[in-house]
Image (tube, coloured by chain):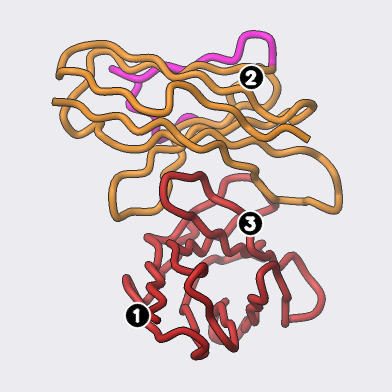
Chain colours: A red, B orange
Amino acid sequence: AQSVTQLDSQVPVFEEAPVELRCNYSSSVSVYLFWYVQYPNQGLQLLLKYLSGSTLVKGINGFEAEFNKSQTSFHLRKPSVHISDTAEYFCAVSRGGFKTIFGAGTRLFVKA
Amino acid sequence: EAGVAQSPRYKIIEKRQSVAFWCNPISGHATLYWYQQILGQGPKLLIQFQNNGVVDDSQLPKDRFSAERLKGVDSTLKIQPAKLEDSAVYLCASRGLEKAKLGEQFFGPGTRLTVL
């Protein structure tokens, strides 16, 4: 069975500082990995995804993530955050693009 | 392209009442999902449709929840009767078959249900 663990429930950070949101997954087979962002009172929006190939994936809004198979991790990073990045971030794993399991989410709070 | 539409956006009911939510996916998307997102948690899949057939409803509480997608387009999710623990945001998502968007789900804004 697949599972996703987001190691931090909340991450406060100052504007223009770097940030890393951590995600670990477990699966016995190859999976697709995703990061979604949810702004207040909105649905989820895809930030980036890893299907295969290069382990460093670049997404929208300056975010990137690195797939590490040996550590079963898919951490999300941004070198310099903005106030507008304040949101909830969800890591997700999917086998073959079908059933998707979401983590509990990490609330990123960017302070001025 | 138009996104996934959901209505209503907010609903307040008393326990033991019934409620229904509606979803219109992105045009041409064959796969449709309903998720339940309880405050402070990630979305949990309730049911997945492929066209008008059910692919996965293993986590749908079938004694009170039902969903249908009769013509393979719009879908409705119903709760009857509602319990306090059903208070959550109900998200609808759809997925197409384009190779460039493999695995990506497009989400609607959700319906926030409060059961009193």
Within 10 Å of the Cα at label 2, are there few (<14), some (14-19), or many (20+) other Cα atoms? Answer: some
- Quadrant where the N terminus of chain B sits is top right
The span from disc 2 to disc 3 (Cα, nearest Å) is 26 Å
The span from disc 1 to disc 3 (Cα, nearest Å) is 22 Å
Which quadrant would residue B20 be assigned to in this image? Answer: top left
Where disc 2 sits, the SS reads: strand
- State which chain disc 2 sits on: B
- Quadrant where the C terminus of chain B sits is top left
Foreground: A20 or A27? A20
Q: Which mark sits nearer the N-terminus, 1 or 3?
A: 1
Callouts 2 and 3 on one subunit: no
Callouts 1 and 2 on one subunit: no
Which segment is the magenta one? B56-72
Q: Which residue is mark 3?
A: A46
The span from disc 1 to disc 2 (Cα, nearest Å) is 44 Å
Which residue does the image show at 37% across and 76% down from the upper left?
A7
Where disc 3 sits, the SS reads: strand
Q: Amino acid at mark 1?
A: Pro
Foreground: A88 or B84? A88
Q: Which residue is mark 1?
A: A12
Dot in front, 1 or 3: 1
Where disc 1 sits, the SS reads: strand
Which residue does the image show at 59% across and 15% down from the upper left?
B69
For residue B53, the mark is 2
Which residue does the image show at 33% across and 54% down from the upper left?
B41
Q: Amino acid at mark 3?
A: Leu
User: Vertical placement of A110 versus B39: above or below?
Assistant: below
**Residue B102: x, y in percent?**
77, 51
